[in-house]
Image (tube, helix red, strand yellow):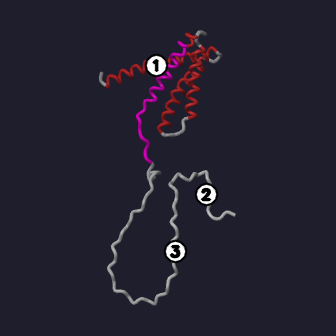
Amino acid sequence: MTERTESAVRLVILLAIGTMAGAAAFTHVHDLSVAHGQPDWIGWANAVAVELMAIYLGLELRARRRARRPVGLVASLLVGFALLSLAAQVAEAEPSVWGWTVAAVPSLAFLALVKVVLSNTPATPPAPEPDQPPADRYEVPEQVTTDPEPERPAAPAPPTVPAPAVVPAPAVVLPPRGVIHSNRPHVVGIIR
């Protein structure tokens, strides 16, 4: 089977499962709404809101992950709407384990299908930030050497005055980056 044929078969299966599971889920939410006193059109509005919100939240979750944005709220809402859809399926079922299981199948199939389709994203590495050097690299200035100037005849030296003795200051040695903890205060100067 070629890759193109396999993709076509997968698309047909996806559409068939999505259509049937979606229709069953929509119908259960509609029927439950109408059975509890809502007008017919509000029953359909509830079905559209519950089922399409789960799909939209799945798409939003995917977009936020790609953009590396927080997904906590969106994921919580997705779980909430999925549970609401599942509860509508089970509420319409015969009160038995098999009745609840069979009634939950359309909703679970629909949600599983959405999850599989939405999680099938190509892995793209994050774009590097422009004009930002890598954080783990220090730039070392380039050493510049110059050719010595040719010697000129020495001018007569002025009378020499002894220069004060210069004692070189000790070199400052800093610990490697990350050794000093940011929560530890650094003391500079004299403490009284």
Q: Residue farthest to the left?
A: 2
Q: Give residue 37's mark.
A: none
Q: Is residue 75 magenta?
A: no
Foreground: 128 or 10? Answer: 128
Q: Is residue 167 above or below residue 52?
A: below
Quadrant assignment, res 33: top right
Viewer-nearest of labels 1 and 2? 2
As shown in the figure, which amino acid type bears the numbered disc 1? Thr
In x, y percent, where is residue 92?
Answer: 59, 13
Q: Give residue 19's mark.
A: 1
- First in residue order: circle 3 vs circle 2: 3
Task: Give the left or right position of residue 15, taking residue 102 as reference.
Answer: left
Q: Which residues are magenta?
A: 101-128
Q: Which residue is mark 3?
A: 167
Could you tell me which residue is drawn at 49 percent across and 87 percent down? 161
Q: CA distance from mark 3 to mark 1?
A: 86 Å
Q: Crowding at label 3, few (<14), some or many (≥20) Cα neighbours within 10 Å?
A: few
Could you tell me which residue is drawn at 52 percent across and 67 percent down? 170
Q: Secondary structure at mark 1?
A: helix
Could you tell me which residue is drawn at 51 percent across and 19 percent down? 108
In x, y percent, where is residue 157?
Answer: 42, 88
Q: Crowding at label 1, few (<14), some or many (≥20) Cα neighbours within 10 Å?
A: few
Foreground: 82 or 170? Answer: 170
Q: Which residue is mark 2?
A: 186
